[in-house]
Image (cartoon, helix red, strand yellow):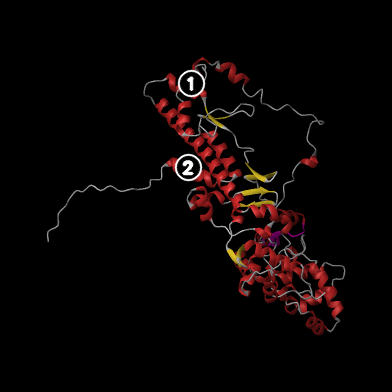
Amino acid sequence: MALHIRQTIRQVQQLVMTPQLQQAIKLLQYNHLEMMDVLEQELKENPCLEAVAEDEPFTDVEGVDRNDLKALEDSAKEPETSQPDILDVDWQNYLESYGTDNAPPNPDAASRPLLDNLAAQNQGLFTYLFHQLQLSKIEGEDRRIALNIIGNVDERGYLDATLEELAESLSVDRAEVERVLELVQQFDPAGVAARDLRECLLIQARSLPDANGLPVRVLEEAFDVFQLGKLDKVARKLKVSLAEVEAASRIIASLEPRPGRPFSLSDTNYVVPDIFVFKVGNDYTILLNDDGLPRLKISSFYQQQLHADPGRSITRDYIQEKMRGAMWLIKSIHQRQRTIYKVARSIVNFQREFFDKGIAYLKPLVLKDVAMDVEMHESTISRVTTNKYMNTPRGIFELKYFFNSGIKHGSDAIASESVKNQILRIIKNEDPKRPVSDKEIVEDLARYKIRIARRTVAKYRELLGIPSSSKRKKKF
């Protein structure tokens, strides 16, 4: 059979991700702090965008009823007010006086902020140890070795390299590295540059007033048994009473297992709610957090310049491109706000009993339920609820918190978060000397008509960061 080349016409539907659609999707998944950064960057890059003054009233274009692209295009058809031509500006006087109004006055001692109100910059562990090295009597080759040791101390305060690796990199003997390491381990904080937990605690125990006391013996001679919590075996091995071992255990428990903790440079991540829920009467009111987000508008100056140049030019094409981008940005922001509001309203309606009565009444909920309620796709709901928080009368929760799988509760279903809360309540009320086992938790939950398997209890307990009953047991 001969092969022939033919031309055919076929009509197909295909989704094209335009730059405007990509921008709208990105804005939808940003949280409040990220939106502030994005809008600040857009104001710097797009000259056709301006921030509306706080006391300036809302225009029809900013309203919800006329929030469409056509309304934005209508606002750019005619100039709002007549602006002076850019060539008529007295640039000489402008440049001479530029910055004088905004320059901060030289504050005197009375108007300066108090030093107590200034945030201190936390220095890192390496800097702290390096300053001690400079003030120490370690000199010459020993200082080079000590500096290399300090550089290999991780953020926990432990030495993150073996003595063999350090000796090989420095081309010195292992004994030399070990000798200098003992000098570095005398630095503050106590326990720094240790190679493992036992050495870290032992360094701190030796710095106590009773340097040769029972805590040092426990760490030196019976640390493996002590880690398992078998204090009776520790007492028999060291030939002392159980009461003495318990007293030594309290001292060891007071030591710092991570000496570098106070010098952590990790920034604190603050949660800024995107949505506020207030109870007014018997209903809940939803407000979106617009604090810090600038209201945007099209620059009237560039509208004037666009209409003043009716012909085709590079300047006109540039202004048109930037103005089109500004229009789509404003439209995408308004669309984002409406979408978040609809999703938040749907979540409040589904979880009404949670807001009224507490976490025990949290219902099972999936993205599909909210998607069908607001008539949107599940992927849109997922973007809206990712990394966004809601401030409610019950506290601040991530939007993902309200979506839970269901567990059988009598004839109804209960959310998995409610079951986790019940497990946490049972463990908090347990006897520390006789902690409840997973099997006993299953039996306790059955009294509340919550029937789950023991392995499910173990999984939820691990998700809550709670160890097993054998590790929770306290001897004293």
Q: As shown in the figure, which amino acid type bears the numbered disc 2?
A: Gln
104 and 284: which one is in front? 284
**Element under label 2?**
helix
Q: Amino acid at mark 1?
A: Pro
Q: Nearer the viewer, residue 108 or 234?
A: 234
Specify the farthest residue to the front. 411
Q: Residue at x 59, y 16 (%)?
A: 93
Image side of residue 67 versus residue 387, left or right = left
The picture places residue 4, in percent across and down from the top left corner, at: 14, 54
Comparing 431 with 52, the one in front is 431
- Whether residue 401 is visible here, answered yes or no, is yes
Quarter of the image for residue 160 reads: bottom right
Would you place residue 387 above or below residue 47 in this image? below
432 lies above or below 170: below
Query: Quadrant of the rendered structure where residue 210 is?
Result: bottom right
Work out how far the residue at label 2 is from the one at label 1, CA to CA, in angstroms: 27 Å
**What residue is shown with label 1?**
79
- Horizontally, is 278 left or right of 203 in the view? left
The percent coordinates of residue 202 (x first, y second) are: 77, 71
Q: Which mark is residue 23?
A: 2
Q: Residue 293 sits in which quadrant? A: top right
- Residue at the left extreme of this rendering: 2
Q: Secondary structure at mark 1?
A: loop
Residue 81: where, in percent of width, then height?
52, 18
- Which residue sits at x=38%, y=47%? 15
Q: What secondary structure prevails in the magenta region?
A: helix
Query: How packed is label 1: few (under 14 Cα within 10 Å), some, or many (20 or more)?
Result: some
Which region of the structure is painted magenta? 136-146
